[in-house]
Image (cartoon, coloured by chain):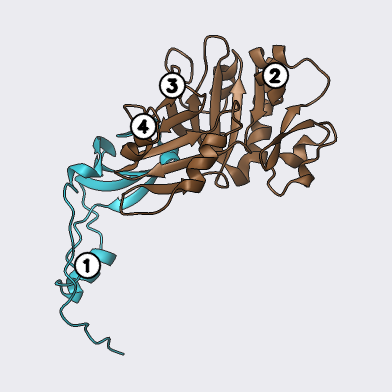
Amino acid sequence: MSSLKAEDFIERSPLYPLQQGARLATLAHSSIVARYGEKEEHALLQRCALIDLSNLPRVGFRGSDSAAYLQARGYCLPEQPNQAVRQQDGCLVARLSQSEYLLLGSLHDLGARIAVEESRWEQDDQRNYLLPRQDSHAWLQLTGNRSAEVMAKLCGVDLRARAFASGAVAQTSAARINVIVINAGSQALPALQILCDRASVQYFWGALLDAMDEFGGGPVGIDALLD
Amino acid sequence: MKILTCPLNGPRNISEFTYGGEFKRMPDPARCSDLEWADYVFNSDNAAGVVVEWWLHNASSYWFLAERHTVSDQVLRTFDPKEVFDRRIDFAAPATIPEIAG
């Protein structure tokens, strides 16, 4: 596993140049950071940690028939815009407007279910249009009990748990770029899923790490999440 | 920082929004005169008083309408365009294609 290199894969995270020296794991047709070093990462995960999930599949659907299409595919949908629902298999469905949905893959199946949704979609007479999100957005996860304090330095929206409960979605600006923030945390592990413009993610990654510094935060790999 | 209330996303910093111009009813391009069309495309009323304007919430690419007093800069109301665009409009094709001069 330690001999894997991001350069061995055509599909790479836009952050891969910043992840040199990290131990990688295979993820379908790409790689993902398993751990950044020999240091213990679980404690960091609980306090303040940043995870790059950019290679995990995600996709969107929009249209007046999208809700019926996704329900027929077995998804449980949020009742209101700007809410998200965790599915039984771990993937996440966020509703971004009256008729737009964003599907985020789960680490448990390495995003396989969501990747299938993107590949099987075909245009027919239904008003249900595919929104490819793999190359438009990068996907980061900010975990730990200091997440809201970190975001307060970058973002005007109150993301503390009492104002931004689990399942809430905010489409807003953080560090001056557009982001989608989803509270996908649990009692066991507070977590914000953050999607931002893929071409800007090296800047955003640096801005987040800088904001996390005062809380002793840092990047972690997915091993800490999966163990 | 001014706060604008987005009908979809709630109150947000004004820096998250982009102004989209005055709201104007589009004349039927197949039936209106060139003068009417040019007026729709190029001219603005720039009225002093309560106007209806297009605004975009950048982060969600969501267009909505706002009633704003241009003198006091007070936003009276923001609302989803569905309040105005409540049915589908199909424009009839022109009977003959007009000759383009020049």
Instruction: Kindly indicate the quadrant of the structure image that contains residue B49.
Output: top left
Instruction: Check the rendered structure and report the hue given to chain B.
Output: cyan
Q: Nearer the viewer, residue A105 or B98?
A: A105
Q: Nearer the viewer, mark 1 or mark 2?
A: 2
Q: Nearer the viewer, mark 1 or mark 4?
A: 4
Q: Is residue B22 above or below residue A172?
A: below
- Which residue is drawn at the image coordinates 40% and 37% (left, top)? A101
What residue sits right under mark 1 in the picture?
A: B39
Same subunit, labels 1 and 3: the answer reads no
What residue sits right under mark 2 in the picture?
A: A224
Q: Is residue A177 above or below residue A39?
A: below
Badge 1: residue crowd in 10 Å (few <14, some 14–19, many ≥20): few
What residue sits right under mark 4 in the picture?
A: B9
Same subunit, labels 3 and 4: the answer reads no
Separation (CA) of disc 3 from disc 2:
23 Å
Same subunit, labels 3 and 2: the answer reads yes
Kind of residue sitting beneath label 3: Gly
Instruction: Check the rendered structure and report the hue given to chain A.
Output: brown
Indicate the chain on which mark 1 is placed.
B
Q: Earlier in the sequence, mark 3 or mark 2?
A: 3
Give the label on residue A167, or none: 3
The secondary element bearing badge 3 is classed as loop
Residue A148 place in picture, x, y as percent: 54, 18
- Which residue is drawn at the image coordinates 80% and 40% (left, top)? A5
Badge 3: residue crowd in 10 Å (few <14, some 14–19, many ≥20): many
- Which residue is drawn at the image coordinates 23% and 64% (left, top)? B40
The secondary element bearing badge 2 is classed as helix
